[in-house]
């Protein structure tokens, strides 16, 4: 193979890999009411001809204007600008790195936000109107690669205390049938039998308790009812592809208090550059947050993770030219100076923005979270050895979980 052919093949592979995340999001768009225009098939690029003459790779036709795909093409368009990226102090870490997370955790505690443990909790929040949906394509923003790595089963209760998943059943009879199957499997030997005994014991700890059992039945009802009619669309939770689309859509929600700030930032960016703001993350369940933390350093392991409140959203700057980034950071810095957001230009190409609905929380409450942040991020304190211990405060997750009747 000639050197030129090798280069062309490598470039073709990079194009395919680069489109993997956003193209996966197309499957979600197909389930949205009235979204048929958003899914325009993109033909595969022909393989190079087997000749020593120069090879020209055919390009896909331009996407239809006004579609999600057209917006994504603009997001990923290669461009540049004069100057360099200048990060303002407002989007840098504080000298004491613990403060960034502590501010958001303190705000979450002060406002007693309900944190969704798993998909069932989030489904209930959606049905009550605690959070509002952000359609994939807005006037000034586009959801970009959001939740495309979500693989959790929505018909499962996540127990944050143990970190275990508990299968959801529609009735006592359905649970008893599964218990009988597990009892039979547990009679054998080896790992399968041991796993059956462990699963049976876990299920019994929940379903043999009348109060817990009824709560799990309600969770099953909440998830399946939403899947049957999710704003005019329905999802078969036993079909892997449908289940994934359902999960992605669950993650397309945000608190109503945070929505105006997202739209304000997006509107300014769109008016200035003619591109839609690429929003990559909004609400997360605690289950999703924990799993994401295994592969993404930006996903903090603290118990009051900002995204689980529904008040945080991320914006991708991966393809933004320096002038775009500088404009956006100036806008966010203005909001931070006004006490409306907490923000950071993170590594891995994202701006993290947390909305402070009532301004910054009290300093004493912020400081009370320093030890907790440092325990999760050992190098966050400027002088770890000199940091005083904070005592007399209940563990955060249990305190808040108790306040919401769980």
Image (tube, rainbow, N blue to C red):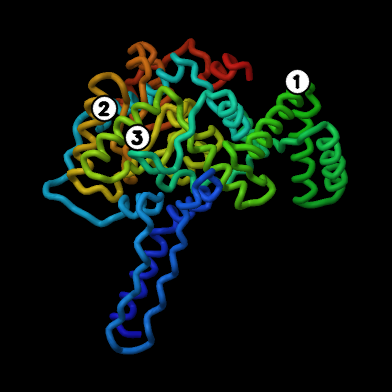
Q: Residue at 41% across / 49% down in the picture?
A: 68
Residue at the disc numbered 3: 352
Q: Along the polypeptide, which appears first: circle 2 or circle 1?
A: 2
- The answer to whether 90 appears left or right of 168 in the picture is left
Q: Is residue 112 above or below residue 232?
A: above
The span from disc 2 to disc 1 (Cα, nearest Å) is 45 Å
Q: In what element is the residue under mark 1?
A: helix
Q: Which residue is mark 1?
A: 211
**Observer able to see residue 384:** no
Rendered location of residue 31, percent (x, y): 56, 47
The image quadrant that residue 138 belongs to is top left
* Residue placed furthest toward the left: 83
Q: Is residue 271 left or right of residue 283?
A: left
Mark 1 is surrounded, within 10 Å at the Cα level, by few (under 14), some (14 to 19) or many (20 or more) other residues, namely: few
Can residue 173 be seen?
A: yes
How crowded is the residue under tag 3: few (<14 C-alpha within 10 Å), some, or many (20+)? many
């Amino acid at each position: 193979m000639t050197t030129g052919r090798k280069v062309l093949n490598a470039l073709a592979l990079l194009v395919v890999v680069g489109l993997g995340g956003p193209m996966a999001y197309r499957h979600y768009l197909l389930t949205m009411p009235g979204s048929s225009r958003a899914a325009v098939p993109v033909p595969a690029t022909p393989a190079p001809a087997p000749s020593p003459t120069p090879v020209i790779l055919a390009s896909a036709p331009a996407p239809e204007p006004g579609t999600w795909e057209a917006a994504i093409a603009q997001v990923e368009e290669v461009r540049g600008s004069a100057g360099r990226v200048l990060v303002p102090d407002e989007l840098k870490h504080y000298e004491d790195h613990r403060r960034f997370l502590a501010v958001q955790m303190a705000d979450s505690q002060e406002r007693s936000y309900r944190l969704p443990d798993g998909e069932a909790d989030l489904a209930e929040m959606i049905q009550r109107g605690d959070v509002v949906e952000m359609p994939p394509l807005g006037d000034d923003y586009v959801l970009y690669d959001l939740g495309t790595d979500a693989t959790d089963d929505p018909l499962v209760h996540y127990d944050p205390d143990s970190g275990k998943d508990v299968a959801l059943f529609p009735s006592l009879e359905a649970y008893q049938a599964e218990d009988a199957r597990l009892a039979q499997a547990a009679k054998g030997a080896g790992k399968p039998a041991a796993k059956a005994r462990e699963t049976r014991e876990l299920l019994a700890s929940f379903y043999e308790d009348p109060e817990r059992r009824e709560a799990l039945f309600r969770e099953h009802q909440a998830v399946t009812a939403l899947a049957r009619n999710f704003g005019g669309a329905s999802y078969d939770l036993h079909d892997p592809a449908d289940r994934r689309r359902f999960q992605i859509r669950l993650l397309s929600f945000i608190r109503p208090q945070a929505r105006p700030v997202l739209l304000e930032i997006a509107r300014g960016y769109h008016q200035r550059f003619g591109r839609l703001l690429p929003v990559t993350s909004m609400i997360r369940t605690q289950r999703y947050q924990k799993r994401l933390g295994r592969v993404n350093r930006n996903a903090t392991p603290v118990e009051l993770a900002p995204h689980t409140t529904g008040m945080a959203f991320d914006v991708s700057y991966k393809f933004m030219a320096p002038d775009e980034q500088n404009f956006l950071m100036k806008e966010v810095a203005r909001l931070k100076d006004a006490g409306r957001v907490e923000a950071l230009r993170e590594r891995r190409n994202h701006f993290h923005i947390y909305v402070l609905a009532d301004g910054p929380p009290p300093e004493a409450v912020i400081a009370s979270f320093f030890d907790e942040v440092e325990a999760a991020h050992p190098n966050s304190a400027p002088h770890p050895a000199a940091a005083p211990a904070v005592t007399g405060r209940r563990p955060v997750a249990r305190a808040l979980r108790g306040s919401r009747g769980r």
